[in-house]
Image (tube, coloured by chain):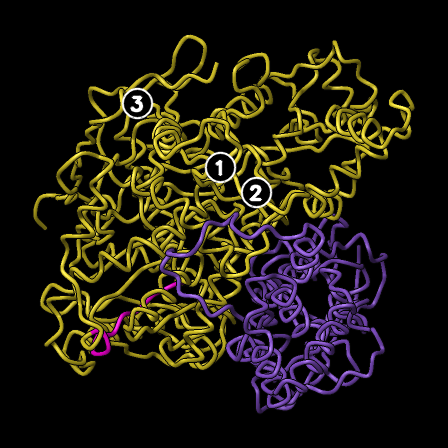
Amino acid sequence: MKLTLKVWRQANATASGKMVTYPIDEVSPDMSFLEMMDVLNEQLIQKGEDPVAFDHDCREGICGMCSMFINGEAHGPDRLVTTCQLHMRKFKDGDTITIEPFRAKAFPVIKDLAVDRSAFDRIQQAGGFVSINTSGNTQDANAIPIDKHDADKAFDAATCIGCGACVATCKNASAMLFVSAKVSQYALLPQGKVEATDRVMNMVTQMDEEGFGNCTNTGACEVECPKGISLENIARMNREYLTASVKG
Amino acid sequence: MGKLDAKIPQGPLSEKWTNHKSNINLVSPANKRLIDVIVVGTGLAGASASATLAELGYNVKTFCFQDSPRRAHSIAAQGGINAAKNYQGDGDSTYRLFYDTIKGGDYRSREANVYRLAEVSANIIDQCVAQGVPFARDYGGLLDNRSFGGVLVSRTFYAKGQTGQQLLLGAYSAMNRQIGRGKIKMYNRHEMMDLVVVDGKARGIIARNLVTGKLERHGAHAVVIASGGYGNVFFLSTNAMGSNVSAAWKIHKRGAHFANPCFTQIHPTCIPVSGDHQSKLTLMSESLRNDGRIWVPKKLEDAKAIREGKLKPTELAEEDRDYYLERRYPAFGNLVPRDVASRAAKERCDAGFGVNKTGEAVYLDFAAAIERYGKEQAHVKGLDENDAATVKKLGQEVIRAKYGNLFQMYEKIVDQNPYETPMMIYPAVHYTMGGVWVDYNLMTSIPGCYAIGEANFSDHGANRLGASALMQGLADGYFVLPYTIGDYLSNDIRTGTIATDSPEFEAAEKAVADQLNAFVNTKGKNSVDYYHKKLGKIMWNKCGMSRNAKGLKEAIKEIKELREDFYKYVNVPGSTTEFNEQLAKAGRVADFLELGELFAKDALERTESCGGHFREESQTPEGEALRDDKKFTFVSAWEYQGEPAKAKLHKEDLKYEEIEVKTRSYK
């Protein structure tokens, strides 16, 4: 396959960036999108040019490190995949592909396609945990049976990989899907219910401080989420928040 | 360096850990506030250790090269975590888990460490549930279990095919709580460049901020290496792209012995290589072997027809299939340990029975499981058990609930639907049992420097059983290191803050800066990946699933030549003072180029076959691995002496007090 890539190049956080066009051939349909980027970078290095910086690590869709806004969609045109799981067979010979970083005020660009998502970590630090010591001196794991449906829903929410596709996709750059997934996971489990009030208040406060936008229920985040995190979680978080506000 | 002392406590095996914990020195809560500990790596071991040390009151500084601690590659572990809970009432016990792990490791792991691991395993599950880890449950609301290779009980706890993710996020949440309280200072996008040793003790590290390129000095009273394994020395492995040996290798060069480097796990069920562009391999969890049957065609002509696309696997009659694991190992069948399953797949493919274009793939087939589950569900729901379409649909639903994410991953990569046609799989490098040598306290041969999780060598011998890596990472981090480190630090309560303006820090930082400058100034003709791929090919062809003296000697020579070429002709673009991924990679590949040579040397010296280390010269007439207990019941601990070729071998003899060393049989 022969392709034309239009890639966002930006030297560092303070530099201004621009789109640069690169022709690329010898792309195999069996390559992953990031392997195609490896080929591009190998060519740039051979030519003595600066390779394109992008985040990636596990390359199997679970670490959440890869990002990229491809042809106007977070993680590209396929559904329920991250960029590293996107394969070139989803494109046609001769296609032009536009590649940009995840853009949001709370995700400043570090270089080219790599952005700083540490705002997500800070939201988790504000309350994304159960306050229990790791001494191992807890009760037996089977002491509290948990309704399978609740356990399964908690698991589904917990599969969020923290990639930030929801934020990049949202026209308001809202982090509600990400935050609600964590709030939901704990709200659905007896172990997390104990401090549910503080948790939702603290996490939402931090989310606002980081400069994420508001949720206007357009649902784009759910469509682009590589893990299929449901909007139902946002509804649950809103209930939790309301309850907490009344209590607080 | 003196003689190796594993410091195994006296007394009966089952009481060693309890007695040891009761007798080691403690640091008072007031003094813990005066002590700094550095943790490198945020996988299960590093994250759990950081959280627990901070909870105890130490000041913790934690480093990871990724953009967030949650990205560490433990996140990708799929199948599950073992624990001797015996919830299924199938005869499990601490002793049985201990026994299975020792036997699975082919009698090359340290007995006392493994017993302790089995002992604390049950606590891990309690801890994780209390943290809100959403394990799989049954309809009664209790925890569910599955079975893994090399054992005859169901002791594996799981969260679909994402157990590692859920456990890591649990440990990450415990860390976040401590980061929020200011007890852990987290350094994302930082790489450890060297260990600083002052007066014979580990006293800090040189780190590089990967965003700005700036070198930083960090002092501490102890340094914990939790940087994972070195499978990426093979270039292609199931490890993450960034996984590297550098932290472990740097401490090796500072005096920590490196143990059993040749003990590598080649995992039997990975998605086969599709072409030269391939950057990494993807695992299909061992849990799939609970329900998948492995086979190749019985006849060579059928295999050929399949490779040429003239025959579909689903068209091949039952009697024309060779379920070779069930045939060779009737007792364990498809659930033999990983090393055995991998070698058996290679044997069939080498004999010409491979089923994909490259001839390096076997089938993992779910049709029988789909039918079995489908019939069961049809019976439960009162539907017609003889209606094939209904049975298939119901069966596929069960399989989807159990392994949905794995099937989706497979379909995305291979572009085939594994619900309809068998998966194609082939062995790939997955885990390294070898690693930094540690004593019973998990301390390396450098006082004050510890190694935990996959980075150390102690628990898995020559072969790791499935679902034991997660267990070891969390056991080390939550329940072992936080106790044992206190014994050492109790002598450091009056030391005060470690100054970073000493000549040792100065020299270490300068050496790091010099190497980085050398990389960007070489301006050679070959990219870093060029060298990494070449190294990987040597490793895979000559130090892979089967090894012989001739190949290993060639590997040693070729790796050395490649390393020399690398320093002459590597091309690292950009500068040292910016976000430069190629520069970071160059440092990691430089270390792999040294480790690879030691790996081959270790494999050459160990002329027996054991676990994942198969020497062609040492096999039974049936082609099974043949151990040589008389000569090789020891740990090879290598001391660095300037270059890998000169490394000095120290032997830690392995003594088994409570277990009879037997030939490992899964027949």
**Is tag 2's residue or tag 1's residue first in the polypeptide sequence?**
2
**Is tag 1's residue or tag 3's residue first in the polypeptide sequence?**
1
User: Chain A colour?
Assistant: purple
Q: Is residue B330 magenta?
A: no
Q: Nearer the viewer, residue B136 or B529?
A: B136
Q: Amino acid at mark 1?
A: Gly
Q: How far is mark 3 from mark 2, CA to CA? A: 31 Å
Q: How far is mark 2 from mark 1, CA to CA? A: 8 Å
Mark 3 nearby-residue class (10 Å; few <14, some 14–19, many ≥20)? many
Identify the residue under disc 3. B608
User: Is residue B301 toward the left or the right of residue B432 in the image?
Assistant: right
Quadrant of the rendered image containing residue A53: bottom right
Q: Are marks 3 and 2 in contact (CB under 8 Å)?
A: no
> Which tag is nearer the camera, tag 3 or tag 2?
2
In x, y percent, where is residue B527?
A: 50, 60
Provide the chain ID for the residue under circle 1.
B
Q: Which chain wears yellow?
A: B
Q: Amino acid at mark 2?
A: Gly
* Same chain assignment for discs 3 and 2: yes
Residues rendered magenta in the picture: B32-41
Q: Is residue B229 above or below residue A117?
A: above
Identify the residue under disc 2. B79
Q: Nearer the viewer, residue B541 or B125?
A: B125
Q: Are marks 2 and 1 in contact (CB under 8 Å)?
A: yes
Residue in view at x 75 percent, y 29 percent? B373
Q: Is residue B35 magenta?
A: yes
Quadrant of the rendered image containing residue B320: top right
In x, y percent, where is residue A168?
A: 72, 77
Q: Is residue B428 above or below residue A158?
A: above
Identify the residue under disc 1. B466
